[in-house]
Image (cartoon, helix red, strand yellow):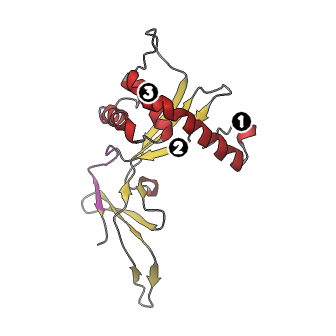
């Protein structure tokens, strides 16, 4: 995603070229990230969407979140000082929010949430489907129903904010298993 504060990035085509070039330039840094501490590696890996060489950084972020901490801890530079030239925003996404679920690109998401007055829980029904058909009896039927992926964590990391090298992928969503509320009942259509 582009930086909305830089007008030269406002063109969609230019933004895609810059984003692709920035991700490509991160690739060697990610590969060499094992030389850094895990929080520094996380800063390098998150904008690239945690490629396969970054699974340890992803697990570190999820563990921090589950312990109620910020996604990134202390990133020590070679001289021992902290690297802090980044801004990070993060939030959990409840199961009751449609944003908390994702289907394959060729599928549609069905999502509804309602409050159950009897046991004071929130009920969520969600699933992915190809096509929906409405019948005269008011019944709806869906084809090729599958289970959606729970995306319960959103993060927006901007590296080097306020500089010509500033970069952000925008808000990214991940499955971290941290945004589930025990008073929410989730059902999926078979």
* Badge 1 density bin: few <14, some 14–19, many ≥20, Cα 10 Å: few
Taking the image as drawn, is residue 73 in sight? no
The residue labelled by disc 3 is 32
* Badge 3 density bin: few <14, some 14–19, many ≥20, Cα 10 Å: few
- Magenta region, residue range: 177-186
The earlier-in-sequence mark between 2 and 1 is 1
Compared to residue 100, the image places residue 176 above or below, namely above
Position in image of residue 178 (x %, y %)? 32, 43
Position in image of residue 149 (x %, y %)? 37, 57
Q: Is residue 162 left or right of residue 150?
A: right
Position in image of residue 142 (x %, y %)? 40, 78
Q: Is residue 101 left or right of residue 14?
A: left
Quadrant of image for the N terminus:
top right
Distance between the alpha carbons at the discs numbered 2 and 1: 17 Å
Q: Secondary structure at mark 1?
A: loop
* Badge 2 density bin: few <14, some 14–19, many ≥20, Cα 10 Å: some
The residue labelled by disc 2 is 171
Q: Quadrant of residue 22?
A: top right
Return the residue nearer the eye: 115 or 6.
6
Position in image of residue 123 (x %, y %)? 32, 61
Q: Quadrant of residue 153?
A: top left
The residue labelled by disc 1 is 6
Compared to residue 138, the image places residue 105 above or below, namely above
Distance between the alpha carbons at the discs numbered 3 and 1: 30 Å
């Amino acid at each position: 995603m582009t930086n909305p504060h830089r007008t030269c990035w406002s063109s969609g085509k230019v933004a895609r070229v810059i984003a692709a070039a920035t991700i490509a330039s991160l690739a060697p840094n990610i590969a060499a990230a094992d030389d850094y501490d895990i929080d520094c590696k996380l800063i390098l890996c998150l904008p690239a969407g945690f490629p396969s060489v970054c699974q340890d950084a992803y697990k570190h972020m999820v563990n921090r979140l589950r312990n109620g901490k910020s996604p990134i801890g202390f990133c020590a530079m070679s001289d021992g000082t902290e690297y802090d030239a980044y801004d990070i925003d993060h939030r959990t996404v409840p199961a009751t929010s449609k944003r908390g679920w994702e289907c394959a690109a060729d599928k549609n998401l069905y999502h509804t949430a309602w409050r159950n007055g009897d046991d004071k829980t929130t009920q969520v029904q969600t699933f992915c489907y190809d096509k929906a058909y409405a019948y005269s009896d008011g019944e709806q039927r869906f084809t090729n129903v599958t289970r959606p992926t729970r995306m319960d964590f959103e993060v927006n990391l901007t590296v080097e904010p306020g500089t010509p090298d500033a970069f952000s992928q925008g808000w990214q969503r991940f499955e971290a298993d941290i945004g589930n509320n025990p008073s929410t009942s989730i059902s999926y259509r078979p």
